[in-house]
Image (cartoon, rainbow, N blue to C red):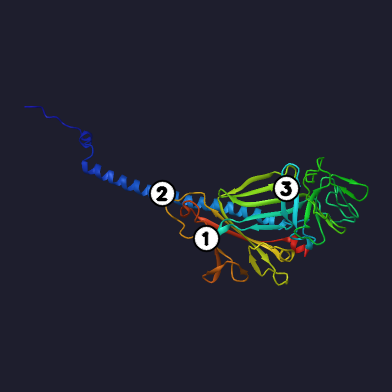
Amino acid sequence: MAPYVVIPAAARRDRGVTLIELMVALALGLVVTLVVSQIMAFAEGQKRVTTGSSDAQVNGALALYTLQREIQMAGYGLTLVQGSLGCPIKAKHETAGEFDWTLAPVTITDGAGGAPDTINVMTAEGAYSVPLTVTLPHPKDGDRFVVRSPIGANVGDVMIAVPEVYSAANGCSAFSVTSITGTNQLLHAPGVANGAWNQDGAVSIFPDDGYAEGTLLLNAGRIVNRTFDIQAQSLRQRTVNPTSGAIDAADLFPHIVNLQAMYGKDTDGDGTVDLYDNVTPLDNAGWRQVLALRIAVVARSVTYQKEEVTFAEPQWDVGTTITVAGAVDCDDSKCITLKIDALPDWKHYRYMVFEVVAPLRNMLWGA
C-alpha cells in the first residue's frame, strides 16, 4: 500500500487560470483598448481643430493689421495737392529702367473671376515738406528746376514734378536732386551720386513741352511704392528698392488664400462713403471721391482634415447700410462669396474671414 502523501494547502491553491478566465481577461483588455483609442482619436481631432483655427486666426489677424497700417499711411506727402491726384508718373532708374505709376495713395488691381486682388500703396518716406513752386520754365532736356525757395529739399530727395493741369501727354515725372545751386536751383544730373532716378540723353521722362512756370514739386524723400498680393497661398509684399530700383519681394504670412479690396467712395460730396466698388478712377474727380479702402482676407487652417469639413465657400457679410457692388442677398444681409474652390482639396481645410475698413487719412486731411 502506497504511502499517503499530504499536499500543502498553498500548493493546492496554485492551480493557474482557466480558459474562461483567460477569455474574459482578453475581452476586458480589448474593451479598454477600444475606449482609450477612441478617446485619443477624439483628443487628437480636437487638437487639430484648435491648432488649425489658432494658426488661421494669427495669420489672418497679422495680415489684416499689416494691410490696414500700410493703407492708412498711404499718400503721405503726396496727396496735399488734390488737383494732382491721378496724375500719371513717369520714372526711370539708371539700372532698373522705366516705371509707370499713378499719383494716388492706393490702387486696386481686380482679380478676374474672384481671384485675389492686388493692392498697390504709394507714400513718401521722409520729413514732410510743403510743395515747391517752379518759377521758370523747365525744358524737356533741362538739367535743373528753378524754384522760389529750396526749403525742405535735400540732396538725394526724390521729387515729383506736377503740372498745374495734367493730361496723358503732360503728366508727372520723378527725379532725384543731385545738388542745390545758389539759393533756388535744384539740379538733377544723371550718372552721378544721388542721381539714380534722373533721365539720361537716350530716354527723357519729361513731357515734350517741358514744365511751365507754376509747376509744383512734391518732395517724396525716398518714395515708397509697395504691392501686396497672394502668391503660393501666402500674403506677399513687393517693394521698389529706392536705391537699386529692383523689386524686393518677401512672403509675409502663410496660408492666406484670398484678398479682396474695394474703394470707399463719396459720390455725393457729403464727406462720407456711400459706395464700395473695385472700379479704379480714371480722372482727378474720381480719385477725389476715394476716402477709404475696404478689405477682406481669407486665412486657411494649417492642418489637412481627413474628412471634408468645409462644404461651402466663405461669405463676406458687407451689411446693408452702404451700397456694395456685387453683393447679393444672404439671410437679412448682403454678402459676397470669397472664391476658394480653385484650391486643391479645399473642403478638407477650415477657413476664417477677416475684414476691415481702412480710412485713407492723408486723403481726408488733404480734402
Q: Are marks 1 and 3 in contact (CB under 8 Å)?
A: no
Dot 1 lies on which element? loop
Q: Is residue 119 left or right of residue 197?
A: left
* 91 and 319: which is toward the camera: 91
Residue bearing the label numbered 2: 41
Q: Residues within 10 Å of mark 1 (few under 14, many from 20)?
A: some
In primary-sequence order, the first of circles 2 and 3 is 2
**Which amino acid type is shown beneath numbered disc 1?**
Pro
Q: CA distance from mark 1 to mark 3?
A: 40 Å
The residue tagged with tag 2: helix, strand or loop?
helix
Quadrant for the N terminus, please. top left
Residue 128 locus on image (x, y percent): 81, 54
Sort mark 2 into few (<14), some (14-19) or many (20+) by Cα contacts within 10 Å.
few
Residue at image position (93%, 49%) is 183
- Where does label 3 land, which residue? 98
Label 2, label 1: how far apart the Cα atoms are: 28 Å
Residue plotted at (22% across, 44% down): 20
Q: Which amino acid type corresponds to the residue marked 2 in the rendered image?
A: Ala
Between the C-alphas of marks 2 and 3, the distance is: 59 Å
Q: Secondary structure at mark 3?
A: strand
Q: Which mark is residue 157?
A: none
Residue 289, quarter of picture: bottom right
User: Residue at position x 11%, y 29% from top?
Assistant: 4
Q: Nearer the viewer, mark 1 or mark 3?
A: 3
Q: Nearer the viewer, mark 2 or mark 1?
A: 1
The answer to whether the residues at label 2 and label 1 have Cβ atoms under 8 Å apart is: no
Tell me the mark number nearer the camera, choosing from 2 and 3: 3
Pick the front one: 240 or 172: 172
Report the side of 337 relative to 212 (left or right): left
**Which disc number belongs to residue 314?**
1
